[in-house]
Image (tube, rainbow, N blue to C red):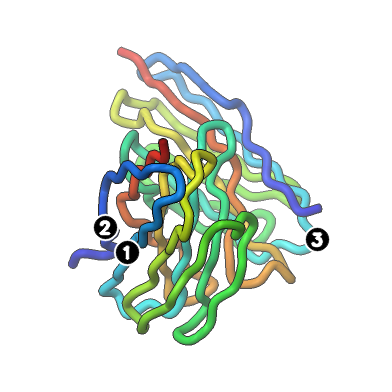
Amino acid sequence: NAGVTQTPKFQVLKTGQSMTLQCAQDMNHNSMYWYRQDPGMGLRLIYYSASEGTTDKGEVPNGYNVSRLNKREFSLRLESAAPSQTSVYFCASRDTTEDGYTFGSGTRLTVV
Amino acid sequence: EDQVTQSPEALRLQEGESSSLNCSYTVSGLRGLFWYRQDPGKGPEFLFTLYSAGEEKEKERLKATLTKKESFLHITAPKPEDSATYLCAVQFTGGGNKLTFGTGTQLKVEL
């Protein structure tokens, strides 16, 4: 059982480049989430999808877009990367609001 | 404003030295409080969910408790393998289908 799979694991971008972070879960969960984790800031929510076909902004959505491609996949796109987007990005999923999240192993992104 | 605060930021214990980590919250209504463990370079791992004041849950050397204002994660006779960052998160009423995380307590257990 793979759980939540994120790709890539590491990425270095130049300022202004674009990229898409991929996330897939095989647990048939309804809700999926993208967080970023920065030292001293904790995990902050970027976007989430409560169910297939819906997406909502979180605490720090500026500079990002998301796509809930189907029930399994939820991608995060950086259209024009900035150094402030250097972070570790985590995707998570859960089935109901009573459940804890299952997290992926993260994508470490550096923007130079 | 709904907030989650964890203390201390870092804690160093000797093996076998029991202690507690704190997670305090100011929310308009609590739907659930979640504890996670995070090892370096990995994603957080779910430990417990607590829903109402007075509730307790245990797993090996860990016990989580909940009051109306805070939660404690008690670590009894810790071992070096308990070293990790412990995160708490809150789901609050009217907050939508998402969790708000604290900044974590980094625990180091030494021999």
Amino acid under disc 1: Gln
The residue nearer to you, when weighing A15 against A30, is A15
Residue A22 is marked as 1
Foreground tag (1 vs 3): 1
* Label 1 – label 3 distance at C-alpha: 34 Å
Amino acid under disc 2: Thr
- Most extreme residue toward the left, as rendered? A1
Q: Which image quadrant for residue B61?
A: top left
Q: Which of marks 2 and 1 is nearer the N terminus?
A: 2
* Callout 3: SS: loop
For the point 44% across and 75% down, the residue is: A67
The C terminus of chain B: image quadrant: top left
Q: Which image quadrant for residue B20?
A: top right
> Number of marks in the image?
3
Tell me the chain of label 1: A
User: Within 10 angstroms of label 2, few (less than 14), some, or many (20 or more) residues?
Assistant: some
- Image coordinates for residue A74, horizontal then vertical, percent: 39, 71
For the point 55% across and 41% down, the residue is: A42
For the point 42% across and 78% down, the residue is: A68
Compared to B14, does A11 lie above or below?
A: below
Compared to B31, does B100 lie above or below?
A: above
Tell me the chain of label 3: B
Amino acid under disc 3: Ser
* Label 2 – label 1 distance at C-alpha: 5 Å
Q: In this image, A28 relative to A90: left or right?
A: left
Residue ID for mark 3: B28
Compared to B16, does A91 lie above or below?
A: below
* Callout 2: SS: strand
The residue nearer to you, when weighing A4 against B90, is A4
Residue A7 is marked as 2
Q: In this image, B70 relative to A73: left or right?
A: right
* Label 2 – label 3 distance at C-alpha: 37 Å
